[in-house]
Image: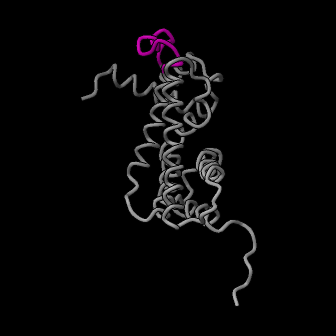
Amino acid sequence: MESSTASTKSRLSAEAARLFAQRGYHGTSIGDLAAALGIQKASVYSHIKGKEDLLAEIALAGAEAFHAALDAVPEGDPAERLRLALRAHLGVVDQQLEVATVWLNEWRYLTGPARERFLADRHHYERRIRRLFEDAVAAGALRAGLDIRHAVLAFLSIGNWAYTWMAHTIDVEREAEAFWSLLMHGVGAHPSEP
């Protein structure tokens, strides 16, 4: 059974994710967190040193979730792995919208070692996506002259901005397929086949 202290700490983390996502890190005070939990402001400090501890915890949990989702993409056809990676990324945003919002937007308020660790995790994730594109080009699944840098930026822009439009009523699979089609086929008119 979860102890009362652990229970309060997990509730504090959940409320912090919700409030940071809704109001922003700077728009949320320790008093707001205490009020959300129905405890005294001073009691919050028995669980954390400061508000940035919560931000670091949430941002790093987001990094862990995105890496875990990418880890779950099976080996196989490189283009299929990319499609599944996009689906996995959007799935994390859908399943953990508040945590993903903090990971994608509020992280910039981190300082010191927490910021360094977060950036290292984020850059590692971006490199993993780049390797998926490189593998797909090498396998001939994507065109040889593909501008991988911009392809990665497009992929991450689709995934990372999803927190601004994602709602739990959205069919993530359908959205992922629509964006995948755009990535693979573009938006330009194709010449008619004979």
- Give the camera-side residue of 92 and 156: 156
Residue 108 location in percent, x, y?
62, 27
Give the residue displayed 51% in from the left and 29% down from the top.
118
Residue 138, visible in the rendered structure: yes
Q: Nearer the viewer, residue 73 or 41?
A: 73
Reply above or below: 53 against 193. Answer: above
Res. 178 in view: no
Expressed as whole percent of the image width and height from the top left, the position of residue 10 reads 40, 27
- Magenta segment includes 48: yes
Residue projecting furthest to the bottom: 194
- Work out which residue is located at the far top of the displayed protein and give it: 42
Q: In this picture, which residue range is highlighted in magenta?
A: 39-53
The colour mode here is one colour
Q: Quadrant of the N terminus?
A: top left
Q: How many marks?
A: 0
Q: Quadrant of residue 64?
A: top left
Q: Is residue 124 left or right of residue 189?
A: left
**Of all residues shown, which one is farthest toward the left?**
1
Instruction: Tell me residue 21's x, y (percent).
Output: 59, 34
Identity of the residue drawn at 74% across and 80% down: 191
Q: Residue at x 72, y 66 (%)?
A: 187
Q: Nearer the viewer, residue 152 or 34?
A: 152
Question: Could you say which is closer to the camera, residue 38 or residue 43?
Answer: 43
Quadrant housing the C terminus:
bottom right
Q: Position of residue 146 (x, y in %)?
A: 63, 60
Q: Is residue 43 above or below residue 13?
A: above
Quick check: 159 above or below 108?
below
> Is 50 covered by the magenta stretch?
yes
